[in-house]
């Protein structure tokens, strides 16, 4: 699959998104922020981080923005609206909404790999209003209704 990608002015010399292993599902996205001004996320704080990239996804696809597992595990850094969605008709800069769930401040520097992006197919549904739904064993059982064991 080919995706048109545009490097914005703040992208500069950064590396393009790349699969870091042969069978990786996602590409890493980098922080396209000012070289001299790191962004420091205090514990519990969130910030919108620029990537310097815009793209044109083909119809029927989305880009899912997800946390990087190493940042989540080691520092408590996550994507607030995970997975974030970039729709096929969006043409603006891709930005990452990061949050620090850790207990210490976390610095983000220019070029740091801050999130991963997965390209995935999208199915658009047609909704039919009905008076009754088919029966299932679970029925209307909600949160925790199936137990933990």
Image: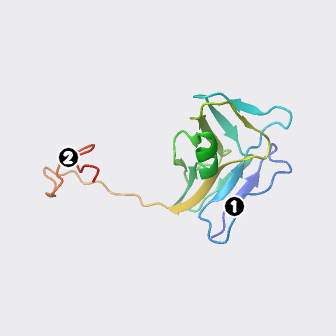
When asked about the image quadrant of residue 42, the answer is top right
| SS of the residue under disc 1 | strand
The quadrant of the picture occupied by the N terminus is bottom right
When asked about the image quadrant of residue 15, the answer is bottom right
In the picture of the structure, the residue carrying the numbered disc 2 is 141
In the picture of the structure, the residue carrying the numbered disc 1 is 4
Q: Nearer the viewer, residue 107 or 17?
A: 107
x and y, in percent, of residue 55 in the image: 67, 54
At 57% from the left and 42% from the top, the residue drawn is 79
At 58% from the left and 62% from the top, the residue drawn is 58
Closer to the observer: label 2 or label 1? 2
At 24% from the left and 44% from the top, the residue drawn is 142
x and y, in percent, of residue 30 in the image: 73, 48
First along the sequence among labels 2 and 1: 1
Q: Relative to 143, say whether 45 is above or below.
A: above
Badge count: 2
Dots 2 and 1: beta carbons under 8 Å? no
């Amino acid at each position: 699959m080919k995706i048109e990608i545009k490097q914005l002015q703040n992208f500069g010399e950064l590396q393009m998104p790349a699969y870091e292993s042969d069978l990786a599902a996602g590409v890493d996205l980098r922080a396209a922020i000012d070289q001299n001004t790191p962004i420091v996320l205090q514990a519990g704080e969130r910030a919108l981080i620029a990537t310097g990239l815009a793209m044109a996804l083909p119809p029927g696809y989305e880009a899912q923005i997800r946390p990087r597992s190493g940042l989540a595990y080691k520092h408590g850094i996550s994507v607030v609206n995970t997975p974030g969605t970039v729709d096929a008709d969006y043409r603006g800069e891709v930005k990452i909404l990061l949050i620090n769930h850790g207990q210490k401040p976390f610095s983000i520097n220019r070029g740091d790999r801050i999130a991963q992006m997965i390209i995935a197919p999208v199915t658009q549904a047609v909704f039919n209003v009905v008076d009754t739904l088919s029966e299932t064993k679970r029925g209307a059982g909600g949160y925790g209704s199936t137990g933990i064991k």
